[in-house]
Image (cartoon, grey):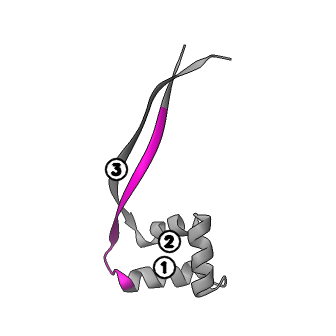
Amino acid sequence: MQNLHLKNKDKAQIAFEISSADLGHLLLGDSDHYALLVDKFGETHLYTILLAQLENLVPSVTHQIDAQIFYTKYART
């Protein structure tokens, strides 16, 4: 097994465009958001209901998302 050493740790602000379908998956993939959405819409057909809500609220093809990412780089020694 090769040894690794820390090369760099940082964070960055990124922006990207995402479709309503992918935004729905992103929101439902987070346990906190999932629980809030189940409380609001119920579990039955949750994704379908969420997708309809997203498309009604923001009828654009894509949504602009701003995210803060954290990353660590390692190098082999």
Q: Secondary structure at mark 1?
A: helix
Residue for point 34% across, 51% down = 14
Q: Are marks 2 and 1 in contact (CB under 8 Å)?
A: yes
Say which quarter of the image contains residue 31.
bottom right
Residue for point 58% across, 64% down = 29
Q: Nearer the viewer, residue 62 or 71?
A: 71
What kind of residue is marked 2? Gly
For the record, the magenta segment spans 57-72
Identify the main secondary structure in magenta: strand
**What is the distance, in whole Å, between disc 2 and disc 1 at their CAs?**
6 Å
Image coordinates for residue 68, horizontal then vertical, percent? 40, 52
Instruction: Write down the residue under mark 2.
Output: 24
**What is the distance, in whole Å, between disc 3 and disc 2 at their CAs?**
21 Å
What kind of residue is marked 1? Leu
Which residue of the protein is positioned furthest toward the top in this rendering?
A: 77
Q: How busy is the neighbourhood of tag 1: few (under 14 within 10 Å), some, or many (20 plus)?
A: some
Image coordinates for residue 32, horizontal then vertical, percent? 59, 68
Say which of marks 3 and 2 sits in front.
3
Q: Is residue 60 left or right of residue 53?
A: left
Residue for point 34% across, 69% down = 62
Between discs 2 and 1, the one toward the N terminus: 2
Q: Which mark is residue 13?
A: 3
Q: Is residue 43 left or right of residue 15?
A: right
Image coordinates for residue 8, horizontal then vertical, percent? 44, 28
Question: Where 7 falls versus 40 (above or below)?
Answer: above
Q: Is residue 10 left or right of residue 38?
A: left
Say which quarter of the image contains residue 11.
top left
Quadrant position of the C terminus in the picture: top right
Question: Where 21 falls versus 12 (above or below)?
Answer: below
Q: Which mark is residue 51?
A: 1
**What is the distance, in whole Å, between disc 1 and disc 3 at their CAs?**
26 Å
Say which of marks 1 and 3 sits in front.
3
